[in-house]
Image (tube, helix red, strand yellow):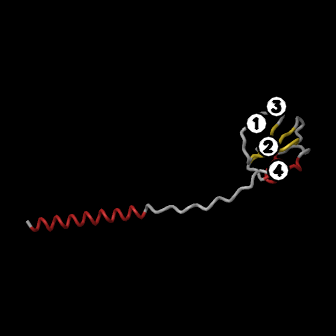
C-alpha cells in the first residue's frame, strides 16, 4: 500500500514539474512588445516648389523632376477632357497641361 502511495506521489511530482516547466516556457514567449519609434515625419507635397515647370512642354522626365522638387509620392497628368482620379491625395502632384501639352498649372491633391 505504501509503495502505491509513493509511486502516486512520484507521478504527481513529475506531472507537476512538467506542467510548471511548460508554463514557464510558454510565459517567456509572451513578453511585452517594445513600443515602435515614431515614423519620421514626411514633408507634405509642396506644388509651389515646382512652379518653374509651368509653361514648359510636358514630358515624363519633367514630371519626375517636379515630383521630386515638390516632395510628392506620385504624379498625375491632367489633360483637357482626359480621365483622371478625383480622389484627394496630399502626396500626389497633379500637373495640368493644355491641348498642346504645355504645363499650365500644378497642385497637390
Which residue is denoted by mark 1 in the rendering? 84
Q: Residues within 10 Å of mark 4 (few under 14, many from 20)?
A: many
**SS type, badge 1:** loop
CB-based contact (under 8 Å), mark 4 and mark 3: no
Which residue is denoted by mark 3 in the rendering? 81
Classify 86 as above or below 108.
above
The quadrant of the rendering that contains the N terminus is bottom left
Rounded to the nearest angstrom, the CA distance separating label 2 from label 3 is 15 Å
Which residue is denoted by mark 2 in the rendering? 94
Q: Which of the two discs, 2 and 4, labels the residue nearer the N terminus?
A: 4
Camera-near label (2 vs 4) is: 2
Nearer to me, 23 or 78: 23
Classify 98 as above or below 90.
above
Q: Which mark is residue 22?
A: none
Q: Residue 66 carries which label?
A: 4
Percent of width and height locating residue 64 = 80, 50
Q: Which of the two discs, 4 and 1, labels the residue nearer the N terminus?
A: 4
Amino acid at each position: 500500500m505504501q509503495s502505491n502511495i509513493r509511486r502516486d506521489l512520484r507521478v504527481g511530482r513529475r506531472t507537476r514539474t512538467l506542467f510548471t516547466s511548460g508554463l514557464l516556457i510558454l510565459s517567456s514567449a509572451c513578453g511585452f512588445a517594445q513600443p515602435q519609434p515614431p515614423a519620421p515625419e514626411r514633408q507634405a507635397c509642396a506644388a509651389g516648389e515646382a512652379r518653374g515647370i509651368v509653361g514648359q512642354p510636358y514630358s515624363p522626365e519633367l514630371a519626375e523632376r517636379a515630383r521630386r522638387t515638390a516632395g510628392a509620392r506620385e504624379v498625375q497628368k491632367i489633360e483637357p477632357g482626359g480621365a483622371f482620379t478625383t480622389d484627394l491625395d496630399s502626396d500626389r502632384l497633379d500637373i495640368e497641361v493644355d491641348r498642346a501639352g504645355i504645363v499650365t498649372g500644378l497642385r497637390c491633391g
